[in-house]
Amino acid sequence: QGRLMESGGGLVQPGGSLRVSCLVSGIEFSHLLMGWYRQAPGKQREFVAEITSKGKTRYVDSVKDRFVISRENAENTVYLQMNNLKPEDTAVYYCKADSWMVGGAFWGRGTQVTVSS
């Protein structure tokens, strides 16, 4: 079974940057479709970004040109670089892995990102 562990969240001022990471274990990493989602208080979890096994990326419109998703297969890790952060980016950020190999999806427990002055 795949296990995902996010890290790197924290408190940052508006306009600042933060990078969150997701370490995957228990499953072969390079074939996974990796994604980042977030959930703000009182709101539903929403899609943020994803990266395919071939490196193709997709973003929600609200983070385009500010966030960059990347992966390092040698480290079994996916990253989300967040720049020019806004208060509305405040949320718990979750990592998700989709595996065609095992026919399932796995989630991490999330990491809190707070954007506030």
Image (tube, helix red, strand yellow):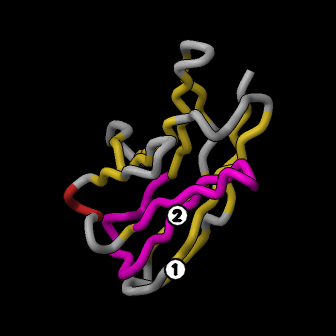
Q: Is residue 47 left or right of residue 55?
A: left
Residue nearest the viewer, comparing 116 with 108:
108
CB atoms of marks 2 and 1 within 8 Å: yes
| Quadrant housing the N terminus | top right
Q: Which residue shows up at 74% across the image and 54% down it?
A: 74
Q: Amino acid at mark 1?
A: Val
Q: Amino acid at mark 2?
A: Val
Residue 108 picture quarter: top right
| Mark 2, other Cα within 10 Å: few <14 / some 14–19 / many ≥20 | many
**Residue 113 numbered tag:** 2
Q: In the orientation shown, which residue stands out farthest toward the left?
A: 61
Label 2, secondary structure: give it.
Answer: strand
Q: Which residue in the structure is indicated by mark 1?
A: 12
The verdict on residue 76 being magenta is: yes
Q: Which residue shows up at 51% across the image and 51% down it?
A: 93
The verdict on residue 38 being magenta is: no
| Mark 1, other Cα within 10 Å: few <14 / some 14–19 / many ≥20 | some
Q: Is residue 38 left or right of residue 112?
A: left
Residue nearest the viewer, comparing 49 with 45:
49
Q: Is residue 39 left or right of residue 24?
A: left
Q: Earlier in the sequence, mark 2 or mark 1?
A: 1
**Residue 66 numbered tag:** none
